[in-house]
Amino acid sequence: MEFVSDDGGQRKAFDFGVLPGHPSVREELASAFSEVTGPLGRWRRLQSAERMWAVARRTNKWVAENRPTMSELGELTVADARMLLHALRTPAGHHPMSELRTLLSCCPAVKEEVLREIARHKNVGTKGGGHQPYTEQEWRWISTAMRTVIRRARERIVAHRQLVADFRAGKLDDRDTRDPERCLGEVLDHYLRTGDFPHATSNGFPTQSVRIASLVTGRPLRSLLHLSTGEAWAFGALLVGLTGLNPSTVFELPVPRILATAPHEPGVVFVDAIKHRRGPRAAMTIALTDLRTELHPPDHDRRPQHVRETSLTTPYGVFMSLLDLTESARHMVGSEKAFTFYVRATQTLTATTPKVRGEHRKSWFAEALTGDPERDDVLLGFSLNRLRKTHLERHRRPVAHTPATLGRYLRNMDTVTEEGYQLIREALDEQVADARKRRRMHVEALASLGSDHDTVIGACTDFDHSPHDGGATCRQTFLTCLDCSNARAFPRHLPFQLAVLDELQRQRDHVSALRWVTEFAGRVAQLEEIIAEFEPAQRTQARDQITDLHRRTAARLLTGDLDPI
C-alpha cells in the first residue's frame, strides 16, 4: 500500500506482501496500518508512518517465528503481549508501547485484556533524561552552538552573494580572466541565473573558469550559496527551543504571506502551520515576533530595528534569517517551504525535513567543542524533543496544545516537581507559623471548669461572649476553639484531641495539597503543640482511652456535621 500525507508532499510504499508468516496475520496488520495512517487516522506524517511500519513488521516477524501456527491476532494472549513488548524493546530500553497498542486496537479480533496488558507497560525514562528539559546552562550551550553554525553559514552565503553582485556590477572586470574570485563569481552567477553549473565550452563558458572555480573552494559549489543539511537542522533546533513548537511543525513551516507590522515597528510575522496529530484542528496560524519573552524590548536594548529583526535570539529574527538564506534554493526548487537546503550526498536541493545522524554533529560543532566532557556531551547528544520541553518549562504556557496537555508535560518534569514541592513547603511553613501565633487555647494541668463547659476539643469559659463574634454568642466551629482566648484544654480533653489529630493526619492522603496547606496543616500544628504540653504518661493514658465514640465524633467534626447552622 502507498502512504500519502495530507498535503500530498510525502509518499512511500509499504509492502506487507513480502513479510513472512500466515497471510491472515499480514492482512490484519495491513488493515490496521491502513486505518491508523489513512485519511481518518492520526499518524499522518511519513516519519510517524515509518515508525508504525517498523512495529507492524517486527510484530509480524515475532508471530511468524514464535507462534507459527497462529492464524489470526485474536489468538494473542496476555503472556504473548509481554513477550512481544520485550522483543520490540530498543537498545535504549524503550518499548514502542503506544505504537503497538494503537496498531492492535485497530484489529477487531485482538482481546481487550491484551491491549490493557500492553498499556500497563509504561516506558521508564532513559539514562539521558529523554523527557526532562535542559538546564539553563545546557540551553545556553546548545543555543550558542546553533547560533555559531548559523552565523558561519550566513557569512558564507552572504559573502558569495556579494561576490556574484560584484561580478554583475563589473567590479571584477579589470582582473585577470584566471583570477580565482572572478572565475568563482562568473560560475556562481551562471548557476543563479540558470539553476545549473557550466560543464563545457559548448555553452559559451571557458573551461578554465569552471576548473579554477572548482579548485579554489575545496567544497561543492552549490553549498556556497545554500544551507547544508546540518545548517538547516540548526535553524530548526533553534526555532524549536525559541517557540516550543513540535519539530515536525517547525520543519514544515511555509513562507509567510503576510508581514503583520510596518518597517518601523517591532517585527511580527504570521505563519500558517500544521500539527497533524491535532486532527481537525491541525491547521493553525502562529505569530513569530522579534520581542523578548516579556513581550517588550528591554530598556537597555538600543539596537536598531533592522538589527533586532535579524537577531538570532528571537523567533522572528531566526525565521527571517532562514527565509533570506533559503530564497535562491526555494526559487530553484519551486518550493513554498522555508526549509529548503542542499543535500551533499545526492548533490541536490530539497524541501524536506533535514535528517541528521549523531555521528555528523562532531564535524558541524567542531568550532563549538571545547574539550569539556560535560558540555561536549550535551552538544553531541541533545534532542529536539527535550529542547521543546525546555521551552515549555521556562515559559509555562501552552504551545499548540491544551492547558491540560501542558499540565501533564510539566508534571513529568523533575525541575517543576521540585519547584512545586518547594512552594508547598514554603506555604506549609507559613500556615503553620501563622497558626501557632494565632493559637489562644490555654493548657491547664488541673480542670477549673466542669464538663458542662466542654466543647469537642476543650472547654469554654464564656460561650455567650465570643471574641470571634464581636462579643456575641459564639457561632464558630469547634476547631476555632484553638484560636480562642476563652478556650481551655484539660487532661480529660486529651482523648478527643488525639482522635481529632489522628483523623486530620488520615485526611492528608485524601485531600489536595492546597486544601491540606490552607485548612488542615495549621490545625495539626496547633493540636501537636497543645498535646505536647501534657506529660508523656498523660498522653499514653489518653490514647488508651480513645473509643469509637471519640473517632466518630472526630470524623463528624471534619466533615462539618458539628458546625453551627
Image: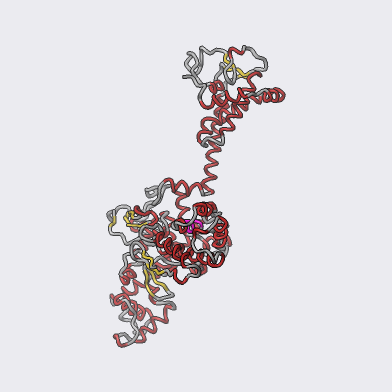
Marks counted in the figure total: 0
Q: Position of residue 4 (x, y in %)?
A: 36, 65
Does the image show residue 498?
Answer: yes
- Identify the residue at image location x=48%, y=53%: 390
Q: Position of residue 63 (x, y in %)?
A: 53, 64
Instruction: Judge left or right: residue 56 versus residue 329.
Output: right
Q: Could you say which is closer to the camera, residue 312 or residue 450? A: 450
Q: Could you say which is closer to the camera, residue 319 or residue 414? A: 414
Q: Where is residue 460 in the image (x, y as percent from the top left)?
A: 57, 15
- Classified by dominant secondary structure, the portion drawn in magenta counts as helix
For the N terminus, the quadrant is bottom left
Is residue 98 inside the magenta stretch? yes
Is residue 373 inside the magenta stretch? no
- Reply above or below: 165 against 399: below
Q: Could you say which is closer to the camera, residue 544 or residue 120? A: 120
Q: Which residue lies furthest to the right in this view?
A: 537
Residue 525: image quadrant is: top right
Instruction: Judge left or right: residue 485 versus residue 294.
Output: right
Does the image show residue 367?
Answer: no
Q: Which colour scheme is used?
A: secondary structure
Point out the stretch of residues depicted in magenta.
97-101
Q: Where is residue 371 in the image (x, y as percent from the top left)?
A: 57, 64
Residue 523: image quadrant is: top right
